[in-house]
Image (cartoon, grey):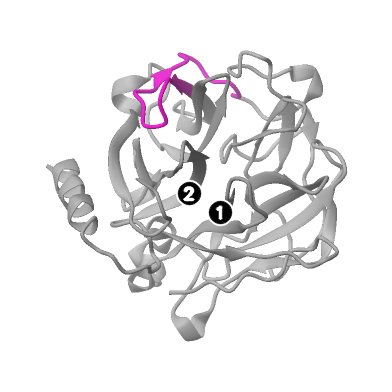
Amino acid sequence: MKRALFVLAAAIALTATAQKNPILPELHADPEILADGGRYYIYSTTDGAPGWGGYYFTCYSSANLKQWQYEGVVLDLHRDTQWAKGNAWAPAIEKKNGKYYLYYSGDQGERKAIGVAVADSPTGPFIDFGQPIVDKRPAGLKNGQQIDVDVFTDDDGQSYLFWGNGYMAGAKLNDDMTSIDTTTITLMTPRGGTLQDYRYREGPYVFKRKGIYYFMWSVDDTGSPNYHVAYGTSDKPLGPITVAESPVVLQQRPDQHIYGTAHNSVLQVPGKDKWYVVYHRINPAFLNKKDGPGYHREVCIDPMRFNADGTIQPVTPTN
């Protein structure tokens, strides 16, 4: 019944024509965006369940980044996987060799792990690989979770996996895209910083522009109004990362009732030097801690611009 109501709400939202934030109906978080075949696709954590207890991923598509069409549930961890019990968090999507690979965080019971499912279409059906691709911390670490996955494919065709809450790790993906080269696992956590600037928490995202590798991450807790995005750069896909001189690129605007702006992905409009940041923020009706701000989030999109030297200009989150 709950899912039926969600589908109905999504269908009603299709009649809207105004461009506004949030861009998706209902509650969603940790958005990942894909440009493919003249359309844009967003995959996200299904939010609103106490304790971040969502167990399936949906997809929305758009031809213009304004009106979004509900494409249905693309992966249900209860139905479609044998290993993941729930906590369907923070998906990432990558198209390669005609296949679509959906990476995601799931709960093995005692610990979090990262899985992957494969499809012939961006809207599925996705078939789970059957076991996690990452199920333990990098050697030597005693804390942190295997969540918040991202995938980046370089100009030479080599793909990389990035992940980690409490730490940031990266590794080369093997050609099968369902396993990593464990000999390349690299601990990449940006060091230092405070909760007011760039102290790493989670949500790594990687992209490349004009030969520069950009690494973005989320600072503070997802339930905090201060949850925000910082960044650094490198000349190599596995770092080391140099934190930007002005690292904060996306943060709350209390005067506009915009809070907790983080866990982002980035869109380059195909063939253009035109960029957007897609992120979530806290629904302002749930700011009080007792109301669960960390799992009442909504997806937004705003332009992202660069200075002549390649540094990212601060993004202004809007309504």
Is residue 118 within the magenta segment? yes
Are the two marked residues, 2 and 1, in contact with CB atoms closer than 8 angstroms? yes
Q: Residue at x 43, y 74 (%)?
A: 319
Residue 166 visible? The answer is: no
Which is more toward the observer, 19 or 318? Answer: 19
Q: Residues within 10 Å of mark 1 (few under 14, many from 20)?
A: many
- Above or below — where is 102 with respect to 311? above
Residue 243 visible? The answer is: yes
Pick the quarter of the image with the N terminus: top left
Q: Position of residue 19 (x, y in %)?
A: 37, 67
Closer to the observer: label 2 or label 1?
A: 2
Q: Counting residues from the N terminus, which is met first, the one under dot 2 or under dot 1?
A: 2
Q: Residues within 10 Å of mark 2 (few under 14, many from 20)?
A: many
Q: Where does label 2 land, which residue? A: 31
Q: Residue at x 46, y 25 (%)?
A: 108
- Above or below — where is 219 with respect to 205? below
Q: Image quarter for residue 307?
A: bottom right
Which region of the structure is painted magenta? 117-135
Q: Residue at x 44, y 79 (%)?
A: 257
Q: Position of residue 27 (x, y in %)?
A: 33, 56
- Left/right placement of residue 274 relative to residue 17 reads right
Q: Residue at x 20, y 48 (%)?
A: 6
Q: Residue pushed farthest left?
A: 1
> Under tag 1, what secondary structure?
strand
> Under tag 2, what secondary structure?
strand
Q: Given the image, on which type of amino acid does mark 2 rest?
A: Pro
Q: Given the image, on which type of amino acid does mark 1 rest?
A: His
Q: Position of residue 53 (x, y in %)?
A: 35, 43
Which is more toward the observer, 218 or 97? Answer: 97
Q: Which numbered dot is residue 263?
A: 1
Q: Residue pushed farthest bottom?
A: 255
- Above or below — where is 287 with respect to 208? below
